[in-house]
Image: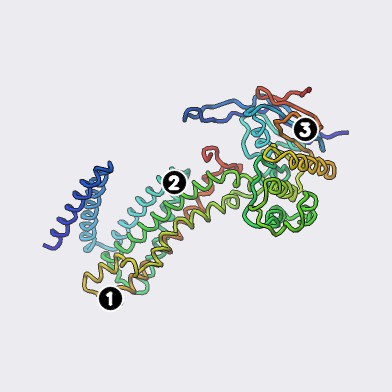
Amino acid sequence: MLEVLALALTVFLVILSAAYARRFGIGKEILLAGTRALVQILILASIILILFDKPLFWSLLVLAVMAAIAGHTTYSRSGKLERGLPVAIVSIAAASLVLLIPFFLMGIFPLEARYIVPTGSILIGNAMNVSSLAIDRYKGEIKNRRSEVEAYLALGAKPELAAAVCLKQGILSALIPSIDNMKNLGIVWIPGVMTGMLLGGADPMEAASIQIAIFTSIFVAGMIASSLMLHYSTDSFFTKAAQLREEMD
Amino acid sequence: MNRVHLELKNVSKAVFRKVNNTSVRTQILGGLDLNVDKGELVTIMGASGSGKTTLLRLINRLSEIDSGSILLNGNDIRSHVPMELRRKIGMVFQVPVTFKGSVKDNLAFGINLWGGNTGIETLSRDAGIPEDLLDADAGQLSIGEKQRVCIARALANQPEILLLDEPTSSLDAQSAETIEKLLLDLQKERDLTILWVTHEKDQAERIGGRRLILKDGRLEEYHA
C-alpha cells in the first residue's frame, strides 16, 4: 500500500511540474525525464529483488554494467575523445570498487546484494558526475589557454607538464560542489542514506555514522576517478609529436 | 665558410579555417624552400594570413608539415625528440604569455627542465630585466616587461635558433625599439641564428639581415 501511495505522489509531481514547465519550453523534457526515472528505478528494484536469491557474482555484474553506462556518459561528455571510452569506464569502475571494498571488509555492511548494489551505484553515479564535470572543464581550459599550453611546449615541456595547470583547474572545478556539500552536511541538508535509514527506523547516531562514511567515500571516489580520467586523457589532446591537436582550437 | 644551419625543402602546409561556420582547407605554404646559415639573421615579411606564423610553428614542430622536409644541421627535424628539438629551436610569440609565479620562476623554467649553466641573474641582465623585478608576479608586468621575460625564458634553454613571431607588435614604439636592440645585441653576442617575422617594412629595414617576403606560399628576396 505504501509503495502505491509513493508512486502515485511521484506521478502526480512529475505531471504537475511538466505542466508548469511548459511555459519555459521544457515540459516535454521533464515529462520524459520523470517517466524514465520512474521506470528505471522500478526496473532496478526488480533487479535487486531478483539478486536476493542469486550468487554475489550477479551483483558485481550489475555494478559492472552500471560502470560501463556511467563511463559511456562521461565519454560522451568529453566529446568522444580518442581512447576515452575505456579510460572513462576503468577510471569510474576502479575508483568505485576501491571505495566499496572497505565497507564489506570492515563489516560495516554484510556482503549481500541489498547492500552491494545500492552502495556501489552511489559511488559509481557520483564518480561519473565528477568525472564528466572534470573532463568538460579540462577540455575547455586547454582550448581557452591554448597559447599558454603552446608556450610551455615551445620551451620543450612534455604535454603532461604543458597541460598541468588546466588539469588542476578541471579537477578543482569538478570537486567544488562536493566540497560545498561536505561543508554543509547536516546543516543545510540531510543526505539520502541517512534520511532513508531514519525513515526506516534506524538509530540516528548509526545512520549519521554510516552516512558520513558513505559521503566521504563518494568524495574520494569522485576525486580518484576524475584524476585518473584526466591524467589518462591528456594524450588524447596531443599528437605523437607533442603538438596540441588542431581541433582543440 | 658559412655552414647551413636550417634548411627547408619543398615545404607545404594547408590549414583549416572557419568560413561561415564551415571548416575550409586553405593551402598556406606550397613548395617553400629556404636555407639559413649559422648565426644568420633572416627577416620574413608578408601580409596577414600569408603563413608567417605557420612557417615558424613548422620549424619548431608545434605544427606538422604536410610534405617536404625541414633539416636542422642536416638532420630531419622529425628524427629529433620533439621536446629536445624545441629546446634547440626557441620561439617567442607575438603575444607574450607568462606562467603563474614570479619572474624568477618563469626564468627558472627552462633551467629546471633542461639544466644548463646560465644563471637567472645573467639571463635577466641580458634581457634587460631590472633585478628588483625578479620577485614580482609575472602576471602583473607590462606587456613590454612580459615580452622581455619571454625572451629571457627562451634564452634560458640556450637555443641554437630563435624564432621571433612579431615580438614587438603589441608594444609601443619606444618599447619596440628597445626590444629590437636587445634582440640584435643578443644575436651578435651569442651568434644566434634568428628568423624574425614582421609585418612592418620599417622594422625590417631597421633590423637588417637578409630580407625575405612570403608570397603565395613561397619565400622571395625582398627589395625595398
Q: Residue furthest left?
A: A1
Residue topped by disc 3? B42
Residue at the location (47% across, 30% down)? B21
Name the residue nearer the viewer: A91 or B137: B137
- Label 3 vs label 2, nearer the camera: 3
State the image coordinates of residue A151 (x, y, percent, origin top left).
Answer: 64, 46
For the point 54% across and 30% down, which residue is it? B17
Q: What is the chain letter for disc 1?
A: A
Q: Is residue B75 left or right of residue A193?
A: right
Q: Nearer the viewer, residue B157 or A100?
A: B157
Q: Residue A55 at what x, y percent from top left? A: 27, 63
- The residue that appears at 24% across and 50% down in the rendered structure is A34
Dividing the picture into quadrants, the one containing residue A240 is top right
Mark 3 packing: few (<14 Cα in 10 Å), some, or many (20+)? many
Marks 2 and 1: which is nearer the front? 1
In the rendered structure, the residue with mark 2 lies on which chain?
A
- The amino acid type of the residue labelled 3 equals Val
Q: Which residue is mark 2?
A: A78
Q: Residue at x 33, y 70 (%)?
A: A211
In percent of width and height, residue A61 lies at 32, 56
Mark 3 element type: strand
Q: Earlier in the sequence, mark 2 or mark 1?
A: 2
Give neighbour class at mark 2: few <14, some 14-19, many 20+ (Cα, 10 Å): many
* Separation of residues labelled 2 and 1 (CA atoms): 41 Å
The kind of residue tagged 1 is: Pro
Question: Would you say the residues marked 2 and 1 are in contact, meaning their CB atoms lie under 8 Å apart?
Answer: no
Q: Is residue B184 visible?
A: yes
Residues at discs 1 and 3 in contact (Cβ within 8 Å): no
For label 1, the residue is: A204
Mark 1–mark 3 distance (CA, rounded to whole Å): 78 Å
Above or below, B197 against A196 in this view is above
